[in-house]
Amino acid sequence: MKTVQKDFILESSGKSKEEVFGNMFAVLRRRVYREVPGVVLHMEPLEVYILDENKQDYTERFLWLFMPRKKSSYTIKARVVVLIKYIELSNGEG
C-alpha cells in the first residue's frame, strides 16, 4: 500500500455554496480515481484553500414581467490537498 499527498485545482459552480462544494468534491473523486495508478482505498481532503469566489445575483421573472424573484449563482475555484492511500497495480494488471 502506498500513501501520497496531491494538490488539485478545481472550479465548480451552482445555485448555492453547498451545491458548489458537492459538485467540486464529486469532480475531485473522479480525478483521483483517474490519476492514481492503482486501487484507491482511502481519500482524505487535508486542506481546502479558496482561490477565487464569485457570487452573481440576478432577478428571474415570469414572462419577462411578472413575479420577480432574486436568484444567486456561485462560482468557486479552490486548491484541495488530498491524502490518498492506494494499492499500486503491477504492469499488465490495470
Image (cartoon, helix red, strand yellow):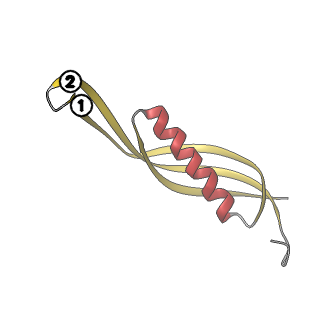
Residue 48, image x, y percentages: 53, 43
In the image, is residue 10 above or below residue 21?
below
Above or below 30: residue 17: above
Could you tell me residue 15's position as x and y percent? 39, 35
Image height of 12 relative to 59, above or below: below
Element on which disc 2 rests: strand
For label 1, the residue is 60
The residue carrying pointer 2 sits among few (fewer than 14), some (14 to 19) or many (20 or more) residues within 10 Å by Cα, namely few
Q: Which mark is residue 74?
A: none
Residue closest to the eye, 21 or 78: 21
Q: Residue furthest front?
A: 63
Query: Mark 2 and mark 1 in contact (Cβ < 8 Å)?
Result: yes
On residue 68, which mark appears?
A: 2
Image quadrant assignment for residue 14? top left
Residue 66 shown left or right of residue 88 in the figure: left
**Residue under the point 65% across and 63% down:** 34
